[in-house]
Image (tube, helix red, strand yellow):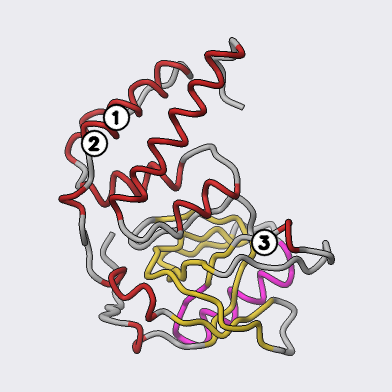
Amino acid sequence: MPINAEYRGPGELPEIIPVFPLPGALLLPRGQMPLNIFEPRYLAMVDDALRDGHRLIGMIQPDRSQSKDEARPALFRVGCVGRITQFAESGDGRYILELTGIARFRVIEEVRALTAYRQCKVDFFPYVDDFVARKGEEDVDRAALLEVLTDFLKANNLKVDWEGVETAPNEALVNALAMMSPYGPAEKQAMLEAPDLKTRAEILIAVTQMDLARKRTSGDTGLQ
């Protein structure tokens, strides 16, 4: 999805960004994530993001395995920053957003801030390839990806717009399927941290194959 702002490299993004910890949420570069914002601290975060002109929010998962404070859980070290590309007020106190992914980041440290929402100092340079659209997509095994997608759809009695699937570039296809996949935080984090698109596709294929094998063994054919 084209956006008005053009980010050509890490130096064009701020080093301190607001972060939205959300388990199971996976945002990837050039992917779109809808969000329904209703908590006061995150409503304030959106207001500030719109006010400062950057319109950037870092999506990151809480790391429950490292957390002692349920109210303020530890964070995984890698997330993805997105730009607010659609915004609407619901009329009942909520904001309806769409974020478009820009680039992944590594958390350097969480900063002390007066805001109710959390902010982190981050480094985008480890993921400089994220700024290059469709980087490495020629290495993706598209046939294997479509095969496992077909098996997943059949096992769960689902349908898909095959015309859209067949015309989608490999980057858009892999990232959209990864973001929409029904897997848990650990699997989502593995796909986020994959070093390249080929590896992300391979993780998605492997996780889906394991899920299908488990369902066949248990006799469960429905979504969990």
Q: Residues within 10 Å of mark 2 (few under 14, many from 20)?
A: few
Inspect the image, locate mark 2, and give the three-letter code of the amino acid beneath it: Gly
The residue that mark 3 highlights is 62
State which quadrant residue 142 falls in. top left
Give the numbered dot on residue 107: none
Task: Give amino acid for label 1.
Answer: Asp
Which residues lie in the magenta part?
39-57
Residue positioned 43% across, 21% down in the render:
158
Left or right: 206 in relation to 96:
left
Q: Position of residue 53 (x, y in %)?
A: 45, 85
Front position among marks 3 and 1: 3
Residue 191 vertical position relative to residue 13 in the rendered view, above or below: above
Q: Main secondary structure of the magenta part?
A: helix
SS state under label 3: loop
> What percent of the width, then of the height, locates residue 35?
55, 56
Q: Are marks 2 and 1 in contact (CB under 8 Å)?
A: yes
- Mark 1: few/some/many CA within 10 Å (<14, 14-19, 20+): few
- Check the picture and name the quadrant holding the C terminus: top right
Q: Is residue 154 left or right of residue 45?
A: left
Q: Which residue is the site of mark 2?
A: 164
Q: Position of residue 153 (x, y in %)?
A: 40, 22
Disc number for residue 161: 1
